[in-house]
Image (tube, rainbow, N blue to C red):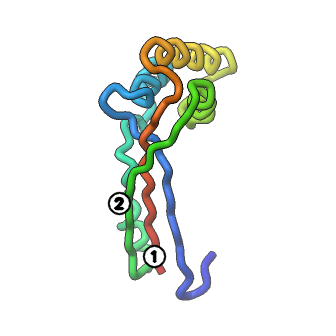
Amino acid sequence: MLVPGGLLVIAHFDYLARDGNAAAVSEAAVLRALPSWPLAASSGRYERWRPHLLSAGFEDISSSYYEEDVVYTQEAWRGRMRACNAALRLPNDAARAALDADIAASIAAMFPDPLLIPHGVFVMQGR
């Protein structure tokens, strides 16, 4: 709960799956394991929160966005993907291990270490 005039900040830091990069190859593996995953291909921008803030009475709503490259080793990237909400929605440890193996094989065949993964940084705020 906010006090009157309080500031609400919504922030997202999302990898960007683009142009066959390691994130896109990894996301393709996720979609093979969980075809109904609705969060694939995120643009990193979340203007869809603006009407929610407006309807809740927030004012002075603003947003900003920029992109930042993040360096990962293949192992660190696989750890990031193991923590992805899609991987956590898989039914059991065996399914998660199979996804990890698919991602490992896919990125090892195409990308040397280190991986450079673009991320979108989106921030929306309102009072």
Answer above or below: position of 96 versus 85.
above
Q: Nearer the viewer, residue 92 or 15?
A: 15
| Of the pair 65 and 89, the residue shown nearer to us | 65
- Furthest residue in direction right, as rendered: 93
Q: Are marks 1 and 2 in contact (CB under 8 Å)?
A: no
Which residue type does callout 2 highlight?
Glu
* Three-letter amino acid code at the position of disc 1: Gly
Rendered residue at 48%/24% (across/down) = 30
Q: Please give the name of the residue rendered at 59% of the width and 19% of the height, measured from the top-left corner.
A: 100
Q: Give the percent coordinates (x, y) of residue 123.
A: 45, 63
Residue 51 higher or lower than 17, as above or below: below
Residue at mark 1 to residue at mark 2: CA–CA distance: 13 Å
Q: Is residue 2 left or right of residue 120?
A: right
Disc 1 packing (10 Å; few <14; some 14–19; many ≥20)? some
Residue 126 image offset from top left, x and y in percent: 45, 76
The mark tally for this picture is 2
User: Sequence-wise, which precedes: disc 1 or disc 2?
Assistant: 2
Dot 2 crowding, Cα within 10 Å, few <14, some 14–19, many 20+? some
Q: Is residue 43 above or below residue 99?
A: below
Q: Residue 59 lies in what quarter of the image?
A: bottom left
**Quadrant of the snapshot with the N terminus:** bottom right
Residue 54 lies in what quarter of the image? bottom left
* Residue to which mark 2 is pinned: 47
**Local SS, label 1:** strand
Task: Tell me where residue 111 appears, x and y as whole percent.
Answer: 45, 20
Q: Secondary structure at mark 2?
A: helix
**Going by the image, does 16 lie left or right of 98?**
left
Which residue ends up furthest to the bottom in the rendered image?
4
Q: Residue at x 54, y 32 (%)?
A: 86
- For the point 54% across and 78% down, which residue is it? 7
In this image, 2 relative to 124: left or right? right
- Find disc 1 in the rendering and name its residue: 126
